Amino acid sequence: MIFRKNLSKLISIVLPVGILLTGCGGGGSSETSMTNITPTVNAGTDQSRSENTSVTLTGTASDSDGSIASYSWTQTAGTNVTLNNASTASATFIAPDLSADEVLSFQLKVTDDDGASNTDSVNVTVEDVNVVPTVDAGVDQSVDESSIVTLSGSGDDSDGSIISYSWTQATGITVTLDNTDAATTTFTAPDVSIDEMLTFELTVTDNDNVDAVDSITITVIHIPSFTLNDTGITHCAGANSEKLDCPVVGYEGQDAEYGRDALAASGDLIKIGAGRAGFDFTKLDANGDALPDSTTSWSCVKDNHTGFVWEVKTSDDGLHDEDHTYSWQNSDPATNGGHHGENGGGYCSGSRCDTEAYVNAVNTQGLCGENDWRLPNRETLRSIVDYSDFSVVIDTDYFPNTKSRYYWSASPYAFNRYYAWNVNFGSGSSNYNFNKFNHFHVRLVRSAVNKK
């Protein structure tokens, strides 16, 4: 009984081992091993983009026996950029600022859920886009004939540099330009019989050989040889009396016996307009057209003898008001006598209170149909002084609202760069011993030879 029981136990232990051995023999069946398929990837089509623009890299991938587990974009060539969303199918970056076209290369690596990976590359050509340079030939000018004229231009290139300047004359009487390959050039204004307009062009070239052009117009003012009028004095004086008819015995050869004043006194002077003694004035309206001498409202006065047209002052608190004063200011080193003067040192309204700003304000607004007004030089300003008067030395029938005070001229004083000439319309004197920061009155002028 005991033996049978142990035998049964032994059989129960051995039998599975036999079966196991049988299963490992050559006669049984086996399982087939599985191989993972590598994913496919496409980094997209090569593209071209301008510098400083946003670029998107769009890749695609698939896995036939599973799924895509990760994406990874990297740059392999070209100027380094910062890739955004580099771990997604679509990455972006900003194309760099370049001096020449350049190819940037990128690689997209994808990995599937079994750890297998694949790569593809794409090229992005970044195109250098040149910004056209800017150029400024300067502000239009009005200059006297035979004067030295300075043309001051400038150029700028936001994405590079200006490598050359070139001045050329486009229209008008031909002049000789100095330093045509510099930002600033000069020439001598030609002698003209009437006002002439000359046009000049400044061309700047940047480091990419791109040009930009601007032009400037220079109006050359004809200065008549008879700039000054006569004095306005039509009487003579003796030893103990004045305002006598000429000539006075024993005192012959006085001022009133000569010139236009003498012709006017004798009735032999032919005038276009009217005015005291040898002066010949015509009133002009707001458009610059002639008015009858009897008119009671006018904007400008034309001197028919000298060809100058003058501003008429007002009493309306406007831009041309009689009470306004201005410091002397001229920012042009070619004509300011070595010092620019004082910026806004007067008392006025409608403009900054200096002579340069006032001229610019009047020309911007326009006066009597023209925009070429200027500050008169000393001799031009003296041409309307009437020495026959003793309170206001000017014909107030044509120049109302004139103060018997100092009026600035455009002439700097040669022996002190801080001073400029003025004319006193209370006495008729011309003075130089006043600093440019003083505030005086101003009367503007323009030339109208052979014009209305």
Image: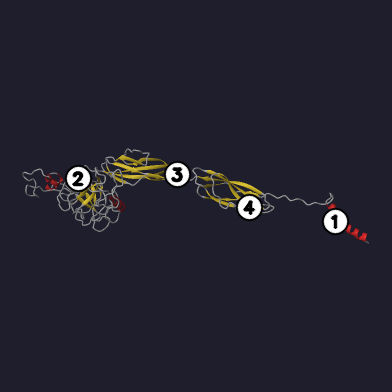
Q: What residue sits right under mark 2 in the picture?
A: 228
Report, in whole angstroms, how far the alpha carbon at label 3 lies from the one at label 4.
42 Å
Distance Cα–Cα, label 1 vs label 4: 48 Å
Categorize mark 4 by other alpha carbons within 10 Å: few (<14), some (14-19), many (20+): some
For the residues carrying marks 3 and 2, which lies nearer the camera in this image? 3
Nearest the eye: 369 or 216: 216
Label 2 Cα neighbours within 10 Å, binned few <14 / some 14-19 / many ≥20: some
> Disc 4 on helix, strand or loop?
strand
Tell me the distance, in whole angstroms, between the alpha carbons under discs 3 and 2: 54 Å
Three-letter residue code for mark 2: Leu
Q: Is residue 21 left or right of residue 251?
A: right
Q: Nearer the viewer, residue 239 or 386?
A: 239
Q: Nearer the viewer, mark 4 or mark 2?
A: 4
Q: Earlier in the sequence, mark 1 or mark 4?
A: 1
Q: Position of residue 7 (x, y in %)?
A: 91, 58
* Residue closest to the far right: 1
Q: Disc 1 marks which residue?
A: 16
**Amino acid type at mark 3:** Gly
Which circle's residue, 3 or 4, is located before the other in the chain? 4
Mark positioned earlier in the residue sequence (4 or 2): 4
Which mark is on residue 138?
none
Disc 4: which residue? 70
Q: At x 53% / y 43%, what residue is drawn? A: 102
Q: Residue furthest front?
A: 2
Badge number at residue 160: 3
Disc 2 to disc 1, how far (Cα)?
A: 142 Å
- Above-or-below relation of 64 to 184: below
Q: Earlier in the sequence, mark 3 or mark 1?
A: 1
Task: Determine the CA span between mark 3 and mark 1.
Answer: 89 Å
**N-terminal-most mark, 2 or 1:** 1
